[in-house]
Image (spheres, helix red, strand yellow):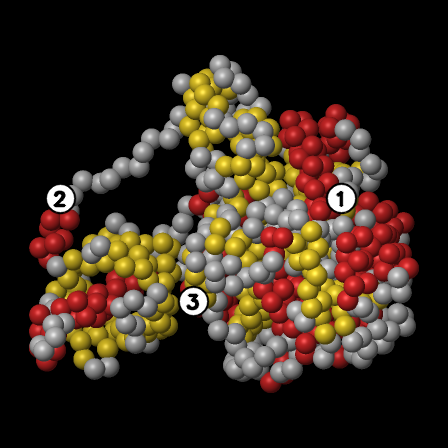
Amino acid sequence: MFDKILIANRGEIACRVIKTARKMGIKTVAIYSDADKKALHVEMADEVVHIGPPPANQSYIVIDKVMSAIKETGAQAVHPGYGFLSENAKFAEALEAAEVAFIGPPKGAIEAMGDKITSKKIAQDADVSTVPGYMGLIENAEEAVKISNQIGYPVMIKASAGGGGKGMRIAWDDTEAREGFQSSKNEAANSFGDDRIFIEKFVTQPRHIEIQVLCDAHGNGIYLGERECSIQRRNQKVVEEAPSPFLDEATRKAMGEQAVALAKAVGYASAGTVEFIVDGDKNFYFLEMNTRLQVEHPVTELITGVDLVEQMIRIAAGEPLSITQDDVKLTGWAIENRLYAEDPYRNFLPSIGRLTRYRPPAEVAAGPMHEGGTWHGDAPVGETAVRNDTGVYEGGEISMYYDPMIAKLCTWGLTRDAAIEAMRVALDSFEVEGIGHNLPFVAAVMDHPKFISGDMTTAFIAEEYPDGFEGVTLPETDLRGVAAACTAMHRVSEIRRTQVSGRMDNHARRVGDNWVVNIQGESWPVTIAADPAGSTVSFEDGGTLRVSSDWTPGDQLAHLQVNCVPLVLKVDKIPGGFRIRSRGADLKVHVYSPRQAELAALMPEKLPPDTSKMLLCPMPGLIVKVDVEVGDEVQEGQALCTVEAMKMENILRAERKGIVSKINAGAGDSLAVDDVIMEFE
């Protein structure tokens, strides 16, 4: 076994590998760029090596720099994580030449299956059903348009060396094919150092289901069930679960056996993932094979008890698999939500900045059958599990140079319903401040009827949120629970406020029992009766709710019981009440005395400033190009400029017809959120 491994990556996946290496007694080496000098993976590793400037193409994906770090530290093996150099055959070749083990598949398997064009040809030659597409190299945008017309719109434009949603675009017409080809090519070059592009038919109603495989160098191969990855945004997975709520055992077995056969055909040896599109009749079609560890691997670990990183390390050290297909048992259900630094209220555009508050929910390990399998540290054991894979900490910076992922929050339960409910509580308990993030959105997904029923496709987000995410409107039953909770919290706050030194004995007498709660356009007169065990809140219609909690003023997280049902609220004080965040909703809750409520109803509503004649920068980023000039008449949907952030190019378009009157920024300018790029007459 290895004594020391280098992790050629950063962020949460580097931290994840370090945890397993530490469990195995293996020392670790972290590499870091200027932007990651104070990163969590740097703090956790036994040794660190500076690798260069912030851009990945000047640091993390420069093979010579990584090889120098290996030589400097004497690392015997390298784990590449995902992204960066994880599917780079030249890197694997350089390691082989230096007699350093690659904790991944052989170079030949990477070349055969890591390249999406080659992998499709191999699948076709093996009579594996594949999605129609053009596998040859595409030289320019006009050729991309021609090929797209031959295939038939809509088409998917993809980077051959791509992954993680980078270098991918859906085109529905010639204009989008032309623009998408160039943007995909640019993103591919920046992210992977390889700008080759291919095009395939975009199947409009698919499920995205993938099979996890493990193969060793001794001819053994197994599959560890499937992951449902259908909830995606811009081709980037957001929610994953294992197993799939759609597959039956026969389909699972057929997909698994085909995945293992394909892996063996290319001499695969490591953890890998074979991805399929599955239609409504459970017909499945090979998409690609990812010759690396997947972002969503924790859900497989949670239902199997198998530490995939440990298996990768052992396989790279030449050990045969210690488990057979008969040993693989799927227990319970696991769900993963990816927490991203992106603003769901601004069409999920990237957000950067300092994490002024970062408090994940406490990790809880699963039941006895999982003990020692995937958990690191001294997490308590429960009937449901909470796991948070992260690479950040409170006070740390979210950089514009890398992927915007903050954490991967996972829950496990014996049933799918139990895993979903555990996830709801975990999301409500996750405190993140200082940046835009997608916690409200994934919380809304957990309550969506289609997700709860398991009836979703890769078009879920586009179909259910066609105009973007505009927040959550809670049903009246939930609102009444929040109203009762806030009444009880307001009473506690008022008692604290009215305390006077020397007169503590009768402070409670000065706090009234009658209040009016305003929330989400509703107004409820309530009466509260408190006792040592909690409070009873009565509504005008005769309904009552029993509230108990140990919340104290100043706490930013409230764990309550409302009629014996757990309720978790994120709490901020505002004049006259609270800002409450729960189940994806962001609410202003005012608790007034009856007289205050009368006066509040007379106050005029404050309107936001008019920005309808301005193009505002929707995220911190770099202006790549400006497509118009002062005096130009623009049409609805016309491209105005391109902003790059988090390695993604974002084309900003005109919302309506107008004439450009002023341009305030040009190519190369760095802008903050809401900076005015241009103005219109």
Res 437 visible = no
Which residue does the image show at 88% across and 61% down from the upper left? 98
Asked whether 513 or 77 is in front, the reply is: 77
Of the residues shown, which amino acid type is indicated by label 2?
A: Leu
Q: Do labels 3 and 2 touch, CB within 8 Å?
A: no
Of the residues shown, which amino acid type is indicated by label 1?
A: Gly
Q: Which mark is residue 602?
A: 2
Q: Is residue 662 above or below residue 233?
A: above
Of the residues shown, which amino acid type is indicated by label 3?
A: Ser
Which residue does the image show at 82% across and 77% down from the upper left? 1
Q: Quadrant of the C terminus?
A: top left
Where residue 629 appears, as percent x and y from the top left, is: 53, 18
Q: Which mark is residue 193?
A: 1
Q: Secondary structure at mark 2?
A: loop
- Nearest to N terminus: mark 1 or mark 2: 1
Pointer 3: residues within 10 angstroms few (<14), some, or many (20+)? many
Q: CA distance from mark 3 to mark 1?
A: 39 Å
Where residue 475 appears, as percent x and y from the top left, is: 34, 57
Residue with the mark numbered 3: 429
Q: Taking 46 as reference, is 269 left or right?
A: right
Q: CA distance from mark 1 to mark 2?
A: 61 Å
Which residue does the image show at 65% across and 82% down from the upper left? 372
Which residue does the image show at 50% across and 41% down from the upper left? 619
- Nearest to N terminus: mark 3 or mark 2: 3
Q: CA distance from mark 3 to mark 2?
A: 36 Å
Where residue 101 appears, as percent x and y from the top left, is: 84, 66
Pointer 2: residues within 10 angstroms few (<14), some, or many (20+)? few
Res 600 visible = yes
Q: Nearer the viewer, mark 1 or mark 2?
A: 1
Q: Nearer the viewer, mark 3 or mark 1?
A: 1
- Nearest to N terminus: mark 3 or mark 1: 1
Asked whether 438 or 556 is in front, the reply is: 556
